[in-house]
Amino acid sequence: MMKKKIWIGIALVAVLSVSFFSFTRDEKNFEIAKNLDIYHTLFRELNMFYVDEINPNKLVKTSIDDMLQSLDPYTNYISEDQIEDFRFMTTGEYAGIGALIGKHGDNIIISEPYEGFPAQKSGLKAGDVILEVSGKDTKEMTTEDVSSLLKGPANKPVTIKIERVGEKKPLNFEVVREKVSIDAVPYYGMLDDNTAYIRLSNFTANCGEDVKKAFLDLKENDPDALVLDLRGNPGGLLMEAVKIVNFFVPKGEEIVSTRGKVKQWDKVYKATSEPIDTTIKIAVLVNRGSASASEIVSGAIQDLDRGIIVGSRTFGKGLVQTTRDLSYNTKLKVTTAKYYIPSGRCIQALDYSHRNEDGSVGHVPDSLITEFTTKHGRKVYDGGGIVPDMKVDVENLGTLAIELATQFKIFDFATKYANENESIAQPEDFKITDDIYRQFTDFVKASDFHYDSQSQTDFETLLKTAKNEKYYGLAKEEFEALKAKLVPDLDKDLSGFRDEISDLLEDEIVTRYYYQKGAIRAAITDDEGIRKTIDALHSETSYAGYFQPGLVISMN
């Protein structure tokens, strides 16, 4: 009798469970249908009765974008006219002229032609103002409009009329579009006799093969250390990150796992191939711009105690996106899971309310942080991003340098300089001399450049508050004296901030002659992060010390 009662009880629980599940599922389906009907009727009434004409496509896209933004920053709707840009982001390939364009005042300009591609081979230069594309005036166009005109079928010509500094009349170019593939490894080489260097800018399709080729070429020099530079790398394809880690860890080692709502999609990614080198010393350079797949590589290298991480805390994006096809050739890029690196910690920032202005992870409350351990027992933490083993703080640019860049004074001077000087020294040797800097300061002073310091802006706010609260009259002389001291002095500031302004000038000018590879070569020579990394790699005590059991990688 007792057994019978037990079985009846179990059966009742099972029936109730099924009934409850059915009820909640039906209820959810009803809510979905109800709200879709509300949306449909609302849109219909809006379209019929709103006082002005509305753009249905724009209105619907706005509503979709805002809806998805309420979930997370990475779940996005990709409209039909954005498909090519999406494909470029994932493959690094498109058909066009091979140049970056941008808005400069009222003009659309070529900001950087890619070396070896149609724009550069045809003679187009950075700073050229695009007046017409295929006979169409660009005066009222956006950057996106002009970009669409420049792209098109490969092997088909496009005519471009430009205005160039130093030329009295517009110039016409016929540029034959090509399939443009942006190199995920823009530069690799030897930093010294013992240290190899690879710069990886994106995790696009087949970038793992690019890294492999670069590393095998560098191994011909018999290096004993490798610097993998992922600074500013926004990430990309998960499998490419797994492949790259696999080059340096034994076959079978777990690299990353994903977990989400749909359990059959949960997966553990392990090293499936024999590695290339499991003994070379490794340092991975990262910063706040290193995200997603960059954090998988740096996090796995750290968790497996395979190398050291150098720089500043990474972005904190540990979410997996899956692309789903929608009707009318549109797509939904939807967050379906989270990444977990070998220690078990998640890269994703746990609290969206604490972010820096650029979206990277900011302060994380201690209450949200969980402790984990690396393969050798070092303590690491979640909470968002990868915290470096060796921190290298990058000094922020001063207001003057930022304003000179954003107001295109550095860009325009580089354009002028390149048009007046046929060649410069090699990237590693080119420096901003006293004469070049004098030319630049004269150029700035002769322009319409003006700027306010942040200190001055904040002071004006303080002054207004003091006057409203009647404190100004009590310390008028002090306020006025401080105000006078905070007024920007262009001559003084150009002299005082020469070093950081010269760095920006050097980068812009070198890019004119040697393009992206040259800019990287020039930057390496004065890169404090690289210098400190080389010192750590070649000090046996320093490098080995990072892997001591019980070592804590601080969150501060």
Image: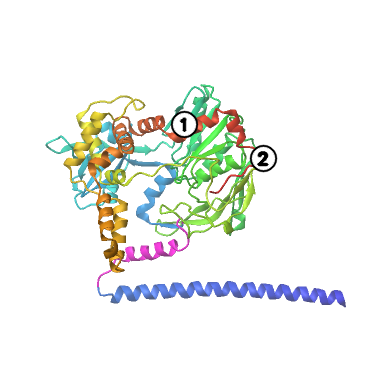
Residue under label 1, please give it.
531
Please state if 373 lies on the left or on the right of 121 as rendered: right
Mark 2 burial class by Cα count in 10 Å: few <14, some 14-19, many 20+: some
Mark 1 burial class by Cα count in 10 Å: few <14, some 14-19, many 20+: few
Specify the amino acid type for callout 2: Pro
Q: Are marks 1 and 2 in contact (CB under 8 Å)?
A: no
Identify the residue shown where x is 46% and y is 36%. Answer: 529
Relative vertical location of residue 7 with respect to residue 302 in this rendering, above or below = below
Helix, strand, or loop for circle 2? loop
**Quarter of the rendering occupied by the N terminus:** bottom right
Taking the magenta stretch, the answer to whether it contains residue 73 is: yes
Residue under label 2, please give it.
549
Specify the amino acid type for callout 1: Arg
Identify the residue shown where x is 41% and y is 47%. Answer: 87
Span of residues in magenta: 52-74
Q: x, y percentage for residue 469? A: 31, 68
Q: x, y percentage for residue 154? A: 32, 39
- In this view, which residue lies farthest toward the right? 1
Q: x, y percentage for residue 127? A: 24, 39
Mark 1 or mark 2, earlier in chain = 1
Decide which of 362, 466 is in the foreground and name it.
466
Decide which of 85, 236 is in the foreground and name it.
236
Residue 212 makes an appearance in the image:
no
Identify the residue shown where x is 31% and y is 31%. Answer: 510
Q: x, y percentage for residue 4? A: 84, 76
Instruction: Tell me the chief SS of the magenta region.
Output: helix
